[in-house]
Amino acid sequence: MKLVTFGALRRKGIIGMNYRNIELIGRYNPRKLYPMVDNKLMTKELATASGVPVTELYATIERQSQLRDLHTILATYDSFVVKPDYGSGGKGIVVITHREGDTFIKASGDALSLSDLRKHFSNVLSGLYSLGGRYDTAIIEKVVAFDPMFANYSFEGVPDIRIIVYRGYPVMAMMRCPTKESDGKANLHQGAVGVGLNLKDGSALSAVIHDRPVTHHPDTHHDFAHLRVPQWEAVLSMASSCYEMTGLGYLGADIVFDKNDGALLLELNARPGLAIQIANGMGLRGRLETVDRQKQTRDAHERVLYSMNYLE
């Protein structure tokens, strides 16, 4: 695994925010399509209709008045995840791994009372964590069962795989590995590690935390050089198929591995960030230009095979 400097990254075709906003999002993501990915419930419905596996939905809470019955709504769930329907960047997500009587235990080990949870749900509904501060719906869904094959690369959380899909072609990928600093979450800005992945086989290329190169996980101390994602072609196909599912020409697909259910689509993003370039030690520009030169019409699987063979 080779580490690179920021100066070297700039010479490798790094694209900036203006290019992303104008040439990618502005050109290929019509605003009328945004609700399909900004609304997590709608994404679940679309994915299910398209045969793409997703995390199981337990319940939704749409009104403050429903919080009077929160104890009853949660009664049958020993573990669950709370998400804002229109949330972004991991804000407002609470993972309850188990409960001890009326006390709910988070992934970090912190305890919440029913009153604490009711306040959190109320904040979600009022739009505290939502895009644009809009009134929101709280989603309650099944906790992803941690797959032990990634135990060496995560601290009290589930790693996810971010894949950038451009005009239906997977063009770059990374694994986001939770740390103690990120509170078990996979968001890079909260302190998770980003590990660039080789599109050919899902093996690790390089890793960063807060944009600084690292070779080992800061908490488990395992070397990222040994990381390799299994079922790689199937994972890329799942991401590639989201192009037909949404019509978005530039999107980020987040995929997790459940030890019982395998690869699951966690969510989609119509405005994926650019830190994935830092994690990979190379820019997106060359790969985007390669895709733009393709004139042949390909289905999702054929696009994946092309990416694996020509976008290393």
Image (cartoon, rainbow, N blue to C red):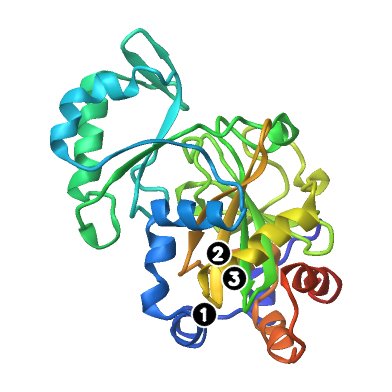
Distance CA(mark 2)–CA(mark 1): 16 Å
Closer mark to the observer between disc 2 and disc 1 = 2
Q: Residue at x 62, y 79 (%)?
A: 167
In-front residue for pair 26/178: 26
Q: Amino acid at mark 3?
A: Tyr
Which label is found at residue 107?
Answer: none
Closer mark to the observer between disc 3 and disc 1 = 3
Q: Which residue is mark 2?
A: 252
Upstream in sequence: badge 3 or badge 1 = 1
In-front residue for pair 252/44: 44
**The C terminus lies in quadrant:** bottom right
Upstream in sequence: badge 2 or badge 1 = 1
Q: Amino acid at mark 1?
A: Gly
Q: Residue at x 83, y 63 (%)?
A: 200
In the image, residue 142 lies at what x, y percent?
A: 49, 32
Check the image and name the residue furthest to the left.
65
Q: Residue at x 50, y 37 (%)?
A: 56
In the image, residue 181 lies at what x, y percent?
A: 49, 38
Q: Is residue 95 visible?
A: no
**Pointer 3 with pointer 2, Cβ within 8 A:** no
Q: Which residue is mark 3?
A: 243
Indicate the quadrant where residue 146 lies: top right
